[in-house]
Amino acid sequence: MKRKIYDELLNWKNSDNIKPLMVLGSRQVGKTYIIKEFCSHEFKNFIYVNLFERNDIVDLYNENLNSDDKFMRFKVMLDFDIEKEDSVLFIDEIQESEKLISELKYFCESHNNVKIICAGSLLDVKLKRSKFSFPVGKVKMIDMYPMDFEEFLIALDKQLLLNEIKKCYNKNKSMGSLHDTALNLYRLYLISGGMPESVQSMVSNNCDVIKYDQDIIKNIVSSYFKDMDKYVTNSSEALKIERVYNSIPFQLSNLSNKFQYSKVESGGKARDYETALDWLEASNIVNKSFSVSVPEIPLKGFIENDCFKLYVSDIGILNNLLEIKYSDILNDNISLYKGSIVENYVANQLTYKGYSLYYWQSNGKAEIDFLIYNEDGIIPVEVKAGDNTQSKSLKIYNEKFNPKYMIRISTKDFGFDPDTKIKSVPLYATFLL
């Protein structure tokens, strides 16, 4: 399946200043698959090393040797000339060797003709808790996420529909009868989410949700918590991490519009769960959105650290955790919780696009779900679960801050109202923001 990160890998290869590349992302987002595809298609010579299977390499980098000696022995162990022209080395599960991660600085400075790509499970967690120095400035890092809705459509071979969505987005033109077709596919995406194995099940079963393997997502969530044992200090920490994660689905409907530790456990305090929350963030299985006191540039300078929301990083996983029947998703029969699900979906699509997440509140009078910072300044984004698109919050925001334009995401078709300055974007086109 096509992944847009492939273009980022190509940019790395074609860069004049090639540093070792580290691909970060949660478990099962498809890192190994797409990197192998890239290496085998874009290089003449390619070797794959999985440190789960190569204890000898891990042991080598734990030895008391200088970097030159380690490098020479490493090449012997590989039985592959990694310095040969048009060659690439892919080290998977690199989190198994903190010292090899540190040695990436040596590769960058002394053997920059060697092209190296690294990836691993819970790599962010490992880096944050590493006892060894990270080669800051000597490694290029890129994030990989689950498949967004555009990649989902590509996997379903809906390129013609995708082209029409992009054209209508750019021209603020109605999709006409294709609007309902795209909305139905969006609801299928709510079921599968963007995990490649889950999407593949949907594709191979011709979008028949009866045949779709719902155990795939359950197994992914189970694997998240099995991983904890490797990177937590004790079972108590693992329990706290699981409690925080399991609280997210119902925290999304908090009237306070923020994450509350007291919802994790009665009487729970920030000091009790900050470490658990840090683990979830570092593992890339949650996305965090901060409230800002003022929607001004730079948004990060105005965040309120104690006021934030958490989103599950994949919409398919969220709906699985909520145990919603697929028929209710397809029939748009989610009732009062639909708004929370849609907001989580939009948060995911914006994160995959590279946006940091921020929102704004005004003393209970208005709330802007997301703020995006682009070449037009700070643009407010309001999310609606249906086609009831009265925009009181956008009106208040416009009167107060006068943005160049505003965006409303809903089930309504494309359009732009010059009087209100509101650009209407259907939920299925969020990836285009």
Image (spheres, grey):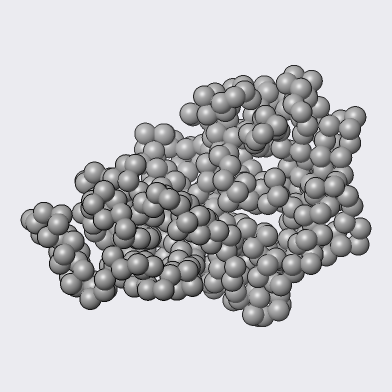
Looking at the rendered image, the quarter that the N terminus falls into is bottom right
427 with respect to 289 (left or right): right
Compared to 204, does 245 lie above or below? above
Tell me where residue 150 appears, x and y as whole percent.
68, 60
Tell me where residue 156 appears, x and y as whole percent.
69, 72
In this orientation, does residue 98 appear? no
Tell me where residue 152 appears, x and y as whole percent.
66, 65
Q: Residue at x 26, y 61 (%)?
A: 96
Q: Residue at x 45, y 73 (%)?
A: 40
Task: List the single residue furthest toward the top.
Answer: 400
The foreground one among 41 and 165 is 41
The foreground one among 122 and 393 is 122
Location of residue 322 (image quadrant):
bottom right
Compared to 196, does 61 lie above or below? above
Compared to 194, does 143 lie above or below? above
Looking at the rendered image, the quarter that the C terminus falls into is top right
Tell me where residue 384 appears, x and y as whole percent.
76, 44
Q: Residue at x 9, y 56 (%)?
A: 65
User: How many numbered discs sit on the rendered protein?
Assistant: 0
In this orientation, does residue 314 appear? yes
Location of residue 256 (image quadrant):
top right
The foreground one among 401 and 243 is 401
Q: Residue at x 32, y 46 (%)?
A: 138
